[in-house]
Image (spheres, rainbow, N blue to C red):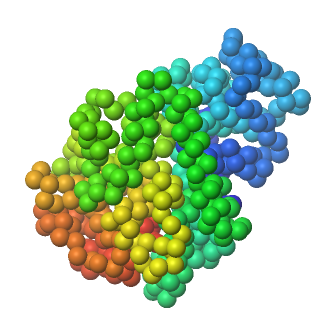
Amino acid sequence: MYRIAIEKLWKWKESSRRKPLIIEGARQVGKTWLMKEFGKQAYADTIYVNFDSNSGMAGLFSTDLDPERLIMGLELYAGRKIDPANTLLLFDEVQEVPRALASLKYFCENAPQYHIICAGSLLGIALHEGTSFPVGKVDFLKLYPLSFREFLMATGRERFADLLEKQDFKLLTGFKQIYIDALKCYYFVGGMPEVVQCFAENKDFKEVRDIQKRILAAYEQDFSKHAPNEMVPKIRMIWNSIPSQLARENKKFLYGLVREGGRAKEYETAILWLTDCGLVHRVSRVNAARLPLKAYEDLKAFKLFLLDVGLLGCMTGLHQRTLLDGNALFSEYKGALTEQYVCQQLKTIEDLGIYYYTNDRGSCEVDFVIDTGEQLVPVEVKAELNLKAKSLKTYREKFLPGLSVRTSMADYKREDGLVNLPLYAVEQIGKIE
């Protein structure tokens, strides 16, 4: 299975300013596989250390964090010599031993010749809680579920994935039914690596659902195992409310849908926990469209999306027969799946600020406004072929953006700064000029 993130790992290896690398991401998005696969491709030797329930490694890092001493201990653990130029050190579940995280500072400062990649399912929480290591001494890479383009590659459609990258929309339109059929499958299967691999091998939708249910059950177990006891019920309530929140026409998160009379201060920490885990994406509202967009962020109004469209479909009980019923899938839940899908693809684009816009009266809402650093691009999401976008028209008249995007099942078209971008090409949004 090919992951685009491996290209970033090659750049990291070849960088003269390389620091120890931390891969962040939710459980089961493929962090361990990615590290090991990169080790096979790029290094003569790989030493893999899993810190979960590893008392020997906890002991090694419990005292002096001098890199040469640690390297000697790792050599004894692995039973072989570590060659700085040709050995990749992999630290998995590194949040279980906070002093292993702290040691990265000393490797960066005193032994930069060693190549170290770390990962952990709950790293975001460990970092947020102030685990002792200085930011600036490590590099970060965020890993998400497979994007639609990666899904095409994983299911034997590499040439169609390449065609998307080339943005030859005349040629793309001629094959649009292949993309639309693949997109329907992606809505159901999603991008969790184990699920995609199962689907690629067996095309068995029931088995897909069984694996998704198992992943969701594992996340629920994580709530109980790793979150503070008093927070667990609130985390569960937030998590289980997301499908119904997204099914609403106005997808702004409402605490009252979690529990009648619910208030922000009761649930803010639970939302932060889910965000730090990588299980949800928080997209904040902006009330104006000017650079820098973050200056106009309304911290009280936001939407919550899940990490994966397939898991959302599983939570809502979306049936596989919907895949066979024309375009019915794309109108289910009033576009909730479509907006989830678009958010998920936007998240895979590096250095992209993602927000949504509503005016103060609430009469105009644009699904996403993305900040590329150079320009602000409003994105209107349509589930089917309907191209009526009153809110986008109002936004354009008020803020006069150089580029606006309307994404739907319609074909590509560009006119007066407005681009109709097919849903299956949303990943290309950052490359449209």
Q: Is residue 262 visible?
A: yes
Q: Quadrant of the C terminus?
A: bottom left
Q: Picture quarter containing residue 389?
A: bottom left
Residue 78 higher or lower than 58, as above or below: below
Residue at image location 59% in from the left, 59% down from the top: 209
Q: Picture quarter containing residue 52?
A: top right
Residue 244 higher or lower than 113, as above or below: below
* Residue 287 place in picture, x, y as percent: 18, 49
Outermost residue, top side: 63
Depth check: give the residue in front, 176 or 259. 259
Residue at image location 56% in from the left, 58% down from the top: 191
Outermost residue, bottom side: 174
With 247 as the anchor, is 135 left or right in this view?
right
* Residue 103 place in picture, x, y as percent: 63, 22
Residue 270 higher or lower than 402, as above or below: above
With 218 as the anchor, is 327 left or right in this view?
left
Outermost residue, right side: 79
Q: Is residue 3 visible?
A: no
Depth check: give the residue in front, 398 or 242. 242
With 395 as the anchor, is 148 left or right in this view?
right
* Residue 69 place in picture, x, y as percent: 76, 17
